[in-house]
Image: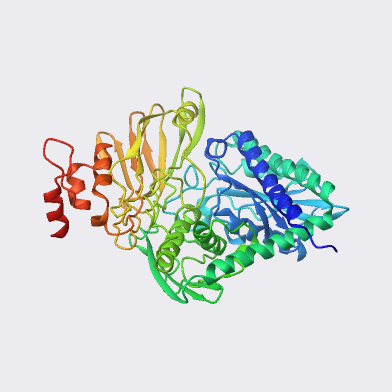
Amino acid sequence: MAKLDAITLSVLQAALQQVCDEMDLTFSRAAFSPVIAEANDRSDGIYSAVDGSLIAQGSQGLPVFVGVMQYSTRTVIEMIADGRCLPPEPGDIYVVNDPYLGGTHLMDVRFAMPVYRDGKIFCWLSNTGHWPDIGGSVPGGFSASATAVEQEGLRLPPVKLFKKGVLDPEIYAIICSNIRVADQRIGDIRAQAAALLIGQDRLNGILDRYGDETVVEAIAELRRRAAEQMRANISAIPDGTYHSKAFVDSDGVVDEPLIIALGVEKQGDTLTFDFTGSSKPCAGPMNSVLATTLSSVYLAMRHIFPDVPISAGAFEPLIVKRPEGTFLDAKYPRPVSGCAAEVSQRIAEAVFAAMVQALPDKVTAAPAGSSGNFALGGNDPARGRDYVMYQISGGGYGGNSGHDGLTNGCSTIGISKSPPVEIMEQAFPVLYRHYALREGSGGAGKHRGGFGLAYEVEILRGDARASFVMDHGRFGPQGALGGKDGAVNTVTVFRNGEEHVPPHLSKEQDIALKAGDRVRVGTPGGGGYGDPLQRDADLVLRDVALGYYTSEEATEKFGVVLSAGELAIDQMATDKQRVG
């Protein structure tokens, strides 16, 4: 076979990426649920027919699904091979959300479809969408005090939801009988399937144009180059072992922190990640399944080396020792509703905290690291129907060697954004009384952290139940190299004229609310980078002028004294404050 020329290889790389991007776009545009249609809590990709390894993933898909869908697709292939799944036929689409078979939490539902060429499977297309509800003890599935996975919702092994292109009415009926607001799910299901069909059509167009053998050759070469590029980046890191720790507030049941202990050994052109010393499996839903733990490491390294193209090759130099006996390797029936949205981000934070020691010019201080999961379910008497609302929110990113952290950025694990306030108020009986930057929340540093978000939601009518699975309520996002931690996450519920703060700070479930009750949330700011006393005083003055910090905070956090009565730097007092 003739060697693939560089231009054709580049064109095919972009073409495969475009297939995934079109699937992402189709999924969001066709979906009914705001969390998919507006917040883009979904992802699409192309996977090997042999072992499910990642070929390409949409640029606008959640990074945490990179390793997860690779793992789950491989599991489907293995289960078909050993007879635990019915063998596929053209037009079949499998559905699976079992976290122990390469998943995340139960609300992340994956579809997988084989693509045939000349009667043989050429590859698999797979996608994941966050369904607003999957049953379980609380609306939205975020059961903060679940002690078994059955309390979190319906768990599906790989089964054919579509057979030869036709939706199976019996499987669909089982799903609808176990979830809330079931009549709205058909829109998301059809959208998820449509994305795969669009991907199949676009992929066949590429194969018809360039030939199957050429595309296969390109896929192999792209994987080899991704591995080579990642190895080159790793080779530049000084040999040694870098240690860090990150903390989860609690598991939602036992009010004690969970520890993620990480040692990263760099040797030659590989990195080995060892989580020995992390907390044991926990009683509550903050356990992480292996697929999510692996994917968390991969996405953290993706943040550090964004130039490496996404494919299975990029993961080859990253060796993750299986964290058996810890809460990062959950086995049935451990509850896992917090694994993808929260624990995954603590794992990434541990990777950042370790790698910033080795690559201070490339790695940031810790970002907000919480998806801010707030689920609200109830009945809207004006419309005569039930609803489940799911709110995700951004926070501050960590400062880095070159500049301040991003304000109100998306979560570490994805590209999902908060749905527009107007859409949420149109779809659900709520009013956003406040929605603004959370001033003062960025961690102090030579380059400060970005600011989080502050919002307040009022229930307008009917009764509802609220649940929260958030994090960083006890510990703020870590500063780096002398920088200070960002502000912690806060949740306050106003009901019956009283204020209620969850005992676990960032986690509680099934809080009864009625019309007029309110929920106020403040998301974390990013960690600061470098000594705050080295921050340019003019930048501190600018931040105060913009209302980001008060004059008192400027002195307390940065050692910058402002003249009384006017917005100007008192240089003499500042010099004394910073030296003293």
Residue 249 point in image, percent of width and height: 35, 58
Name the image quarter holding residue 493: top left
* Residue at the extreme front: 571
Looking at the image, residue 221 sits to the left or right of residue 510; the answer is right
Name the image quarter holding residue 551: top left
Residue 74 point in image, percent of width and height: 68, 61
Q: Is residue 431 visible?
A: yes
Looking at the image, residue 516 sits to the left or right of residue 386; the answer is left
Q: How is the image coloured?
A: rainbow
| In the rendered image, the vertical position of residue 461 relative to residue 93, given as above or below | above
Residue visible at 62% across and 60% down in the picture: 101
Looking at the image, residue 491 sits to the left or right of residue 132; the answer is left
Residue 540 point in image, percent of width and height: 25, 46
Q: Quadrant of the N terminus?
A: bottom right
Looking at the image, residue 239 sits to the left or right of residue 212; the answer is left
| In the rendered image, the vertical position of residue 179 relative to residue 421, given as above or below | below
Residue visible at 60% across and 64% down in the picture: 229
Q: Quadrant of the C terminus?
A: bottom left
Name the image quarter holding residue 226: bottom right
Q: How many discs mark residues in the rendered view? A: 0
Residue visible at 49% across and 57% down in the picture: 339
Q: Is residue 129 visible?
A: no
* Residue at the extreme top: 382
Q: Viewer-proximal residue, 9 or 164?
A: 9
